Amino acid sequence: MKSLKSVLLSTLLIFTLANNSFAEAPPSPTQAPDGVESATPQELIDVFQNGGEVYDIRWHYSTYEFGGHIPFARYVPYTEWSTKEDNYNIKEDSWDYSVLPQDKNTPVAFTCGGVSCWKSYKLTKEVAARGYKNVYWLREGQAAWDAQNLPVLGRNPVYEPMMKLFSGEHEPTTWIIDAKTLKEMFDANEDIKVVDFRDEALFVKGRLQSAFNVPIQRILYKDGLQLLPKPKQEYKIVLISDTGTLAATAAAPLAALGYDVKVLDGGMNAWTAKYGKENTVDGELEVNYPDQKDWKRQIPKLPKNR
């Protein structure tokens, strides 16, 4: 069985791979290399309209696919291992030079992510050194194109917010808590709402305090969200299932909505193994309307010993 950590990481692989939470690289040189022209977005358009080639060389394909790209730019990623400084060794890097036009008079232009991307600087310098006569470098990259509100392809509105959401202290594995941590939270009387995704029959036999039961497929519907405290309230949302695996699948969308979400590693099985029936309650939940005893009408019920 996969660990909860591996479930979270595999679920969010596209975001964690493209996560730029590491320190930002130093800006590339402002002066274009010898034999290279600094370009504007309009000049890239001119290159394309005059029969030239424009290459987007960003390494992460996800940035190209989901972050948006110049409609006519050809995606050929540049793999960079050399240092981001003047004495770099381009032999440490790799790029598919076979995609370049055979006629070295054909205009070629290169773009990357922004001024901190050294790839386009290094590549334009190398292409000029290989004898190409009309080499253009858009130093500001995609950011310069976007600043002029020019058309893009492949821009998914979820992508950039996700990059921010899953970076730094919000990296997905920080959502995982163990039973000991949750017990400490209960003992400290922290404001916790427990969402229990187990079958109703198991839920009724024993659940954590302040828990309510929602089918996993309904938590993001209006009625499911209605049972959660508002995101800006100081509540932690703890997701529970038998082993934690099912609960982990709901973590990302709830976090995207702004909830302070946690997932109990090992789920209710781990809690029972360590603490038995401590901080639990059994029986059916009280409901607002006696004739509507379903998950939409739940009122969380604290254990009698509190």
Image (cartoon, grey):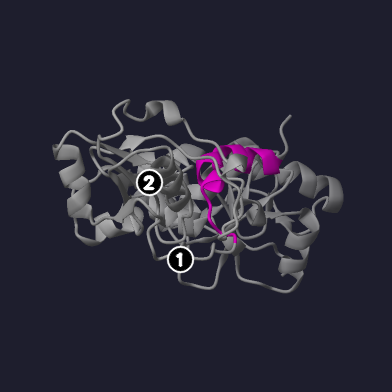
- Residue placed at 62% from the left, 42% from the top? 92
* Kind of element beneath mark 1: loop
Q: Which residues are magenta?
A: 4-22
Name the N-terminal-most of marks 1 and 2.
2
Question: Tags 1 and 2 in contact by the CB under 8 Å rule?
Answer: no
Asked which quadrant contains residue 70, the reply is top left
Residue 47 visible within the image: yes
Closer-to-camera residue (78/219): 78
* Kind of element beneath mark 2: loop
For the residue marked with disc 2, what is the amino acid? Tyr
Residue at the spot of label 2:
221
Q: Point out residue 11 in the picture as x, y percentages from the top left corner.
A: 56, 39
* 10 magenta-colored: yes
- Check disc 2: other Cα within 10 Å, few if <14, some if 14-19, many if 20+: few
Q: Check the image and name the residue furthest to the right.
A: 274
Q: Point out residue 278 in the picture as x, y percentages from the top left corner.
A: 80, 57
- Residue placed at 18% from the left, 33% from the top? 51
For the residue marked with disc 1, what is the amino acid? Pro
Q: Is residue 259 above or below residue 247?
A: below
| Quarter of the rendering occupied by the C terminus | bottom right
Residue 293 visible within the image: no
Main SS, magenta region, reads helix
Task: Tell me if 64 is positioned left or right of 26 in this view.
Answer: left
Asked which quadrant contains residue 257, the reply is bottom left
Closer-to-camera residue (262/140): 140
Task: Tell me if 161 is positioned left or right of 135 in this view.
Answer: right
Residue at the spot of label 1:
231
| Quarter of the rendering occupied by the N terminus | top right
